[in-house]
Image (cartoon, coloured by chain):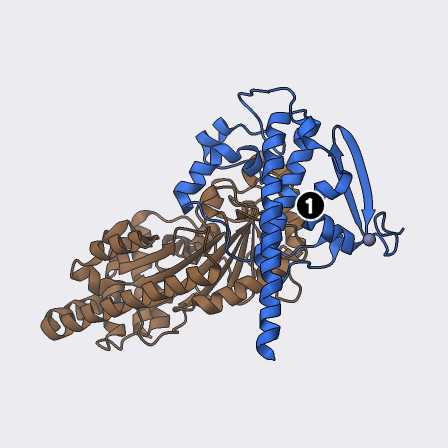
Amino acid sequence: MTAVNGAAGITTLPYVAWAEPQDERQIVVSTRLRLARNLTGKPFPNRLSDAEAEQLGREMAEALPQGEGWQVLRLDELLERERGVLLEKHLLSRDILQHTRGRLLAVNTAQTLAIMLNEEDHLRIQAILPGLQPEAAWRELSALDDQLAAKLDFAYDGRLGYLTACPSNLGTGLRASVMLHLSGLQLLGKLDGIFRQLAQAGFTVRGVYGEGSESRGGLFQISNQVTLGCSEEEIISRLRELVEEIITQEQQARDWLKTNRRDWLEDKIGRAVGVLAGAHLLTGKEAMEQISWVRLGVAMGLCDKIDWRELNLLMLSVQTPFLLTTAGRELAPQERDALRAKIARQYMAQ
Amino acid sequence: MLCDKCGKNPATVYYKQVINGELTEQHLCEECAGDLMNFGGLGSFGQLDLNKLFSGAVQQESGRRCPGCGMTFAEYNSGGRLGCSRCYQAFEAELRPVIQRFHGGKRHMGKVKLIRPGGGGSVFMNNPELANQNYERLALQKQLSELIELEKFEEAAKVRDKIRALDKAMQSAAAKAQSDQTGKAGDVR
Ligand SMILES: [Zn+2]
Ligand SMILES: [Zn+2]
């Protein structure tokens, strides 16, 4: 086990695999799948002492497949801003940061696979890919699960499937999520109806930044809620069906805007480009709003000042943990706004 | 060491069971261990009349603790997280409505954990239904042994009934698999 904290910029640089362009429709940002697994005969992490958690974490890290270039990070040894960076990259959950002793994160070189050790469950195995790729993510995730299962004895029951600390994750232990940019539907006020339909289908929606349909940056995450009584393939194909349907509706919303509100739309996008390229003080809230307009412009072919990938990297770079990493120190609110604006100007000038 | 049951193959599986407070140990080959885990495990094991065991004392518990981690159900209710995987057995009755509410009372239909009795083999690899029932049976059998050890005969009787019902289900699932197999062979011709 190699415990090299922060090597290759995992905890410092804004680069992450899901920032890449993948789908020419440019509505889906990323797909994330995770499996919950626990070890037979061991108390769940919430019942482990720090020493026990550390010991068990080491044992589980030994089971990582060889030759994937896994980096194992001790969360209690990271700076707060480094943990924040991992959170913004979606490699980490907020929950695991509540208590960091004995908690580890293993990440592969490509930053497409990440395993949280001793989160709510002993293992939270994740695959994160750009665009809408739930099938490919499942292939990678399931293969990693098999490799780990060859060395670790996972708690399992014939009727309940994989046993988890919270009964809401029982069975497959699979949570499949897709992050989408839905600003067209948001502008037309159609999100609440879609959210209701999704809830009826057993899926949840939440804003990635901010809450509900007020989400900043127009980004939403859709995930399955039920994990028991259906196969992984069923969960994944159901998610794809629903997401494809939402993509169609988002495209219709964008078409309507283009046909009926073109001047207004181009004005908004042009002003957003102007703010990002020229502002000297930029709050986090405003940055996310302007990035959302520019994202809409890029996806609709109404803006060529920046591309999808750079926009994703910009979005990450203006989040506070990255600002603190860039500065290498704590920053007062106004200093943050100034640095955020400077980084945005640099991205827009490229 | 040769298998205690057939005396032919090398023993690779250590099989331990507590019946009526008495420890029974067997060293078995993969094949015989598979049989034992598969059908009529208890029945063919010692031809015990289990009904005799279960007429015993009634124990009413409050603040019952999971034998695996020592957690009570009240603690689960306040924290929302179970203490270990054995809590699912220990608080089966209490958890049933919780699981029903989350998932609608269905059984696991996803990936099946590979079975490794004594480290090798995959008896039910091509039959997930049987594999899962087998897992259920192993868990119930373990539960039964513990309950008998603790002389909780009334609960043990319930578990024994579950095992019997499961054996029937497994037999018909196996028969179905068998006839599907012959059906397929027939199609080829
Ligand atoms: Zn034998
Ligand atoms: Zn327990």
Ligand 1 under 8 Å from disc 1 Cβ: no
Quadrant of residue B150 within the rendered picture: top right
Extreme residue in the bottom direction: B189
Q: Nearer the viewer, residue A138 or B183?
A: B183
Subunit ID for the residue under disc 1: B
Q: Nearer the viewer, residue A129 or A239?
A: A239
Given the image, on which type of amino acid does mark 1 rest?
A: Gly
Specify few, some or many for label 1: CA neighbours under 10 Å numbering under 14, 14-19, or 20 or more. Answer: some
Question: Which residue appears at 37% of the width and 49% of the height?
Answer: A331
Dividing the image into 4 quarters, which one contains the C terminus of chain B?
A: bottom right
Q: Nearer the viewer, residue B35 or B185?
A: B185
Q: Which chain is blue?
A: B
Question: Which residue appears at 42% of the width and 46% of the height?
Answer: B103
Chain A rendering hue: brown
Pinpoint residue A134: horizontal percent, then vertical percent.
43, 66
Image-based side of A150 in relation to A85, left or right: right
Residue tagged 1: B40
Residue B12 in sight in this render: yes
Pinpoint residue A237: horizontal percent, then vertical percent.
40, 65
Pinpoint residue A174: horizontal percent, then vertical percent.
47, 55
